[in-house]
Amino acid sequence: MTKTNYNTIPVDQDRLEDIISVLDTGGLLLYPTDTIWGVGCDATNPQAVEKVYALKQRDRSKPCILLVDSVATLKDYVREVHPRVDNLLTYHTRPLTVVYPQAQQLPPISTSADGSVAIRVALGGFCKSLLQAYGKPLISTSANISTEPFPANFGEISSAIIRGVDYVVKAEQYDKTTREPSVIVRVDGEGELEFLRS
């Protein structure tokens, strides 16, 4: 059966069922996260994650960030959430990506070589609604070829990226707000925060 290319469907709005169908079949998504525009896929599908690396021409030794909809979902994919991090995630008002030392229920391609994983609980917007509907983590990596700068808004995304995905989300395309990547922190064994990107 021929796979539907959702980029060619002239609809005025995104339908979550269409996007979920793309994700379920290992497709790639171009979507607005709670920070910058990203290329994503089902983070539990290693073949789909491999396609993200190929499209971005990204070094496989550089793991991507994952997005989840809630702390409850986060706890399904990491062995432990330090109480200080749990509290931080509850009250932090800026998008915050945390590197956790031990992932679980994720393929090796979605984690670092040492088994750690960087995950962000999405704060809102279209991507949070999608994550809630999908119920699994999504890969979130900036929508650019690895040697190029990240796009500050949809208008800066290259045609190579747009052509390389299976679905381009329509939501927030006309938002010209300049966006920045999230803060990234790691927590040591004592619960102290180390900022990797601020």
Image: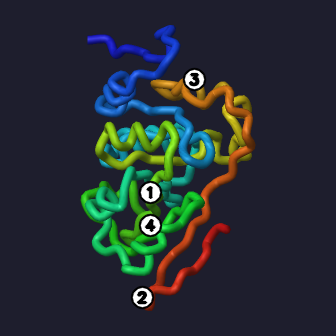
| Residues at marks 1 and 2, CA–CA distance in whole angstroms | 21 Å
Q: Earlier in the sequence, mark 4 or mark 3?
A: 4
Q: Nearer the viewer, mark 3 or mark 2?
A: 2
Residue 106: image location, x then y, percent: 30, 56
Residue 89 seen in render: yes
Q: Which amino acid lies under the numbered mark 2 shown in the image of this protein? A: Gly
**Within 10 angstroms of label 1, few (less than 14), some, or many (20 or more) residues?**
many
Q: Which residue is mark 4?
A: 90
Q: Give above or below for 57 relative to 120.
A: above
| Residues at marks 4 and 3, CA–CA distance in whole angstroms | 38 Å
Q: Which residue is mark 1?
A: 121
Camera-side residue: 136 or 86? 86
Disc 2 and disc 4 in contact, CB within 8 angstroms: no
**Quadrant of the image for the N terminus?**
top left
Residue pictured at 31% horizontal, 48% vertical:
44
Residue 114: image location, x then y, percent: 40, 72
| Residues at marks 4 and 1, CA–CA distance in whole angstroms | 10 Å
Q: Earlier in the sequence, mark 3 or mark 1?
A: 1
Q: Nearer the viewer, mark 4 or mark 3?
A: 4
Q: Which residue is mark 2?
A: 189
Residue 157 seen in render: no
Q: Nearer the viewer, mark 1 or mark 2?
A: 1
Residue 167: image location, x then y, percent: 47, 25
Q: Which amino acid lies under the numbered mark 3 shown in the image of this protein? A: Arg
| Residues at marks 3 and 2, CA–CA distance in whole angstroms | 43 Å
Q: Which amino acid lies under the numbered mark 4 shown in the image of this protein? A: Thr
Callout 3 secondary element: helix
Q: Nearer the viewer, mark 3 or mark 1?
A: 1
Query: Where on the picture, by quarter, is residue 171?
Result: top right
State the mark number for residue 133: none
Q: Which residue is mark 3?
A: 163
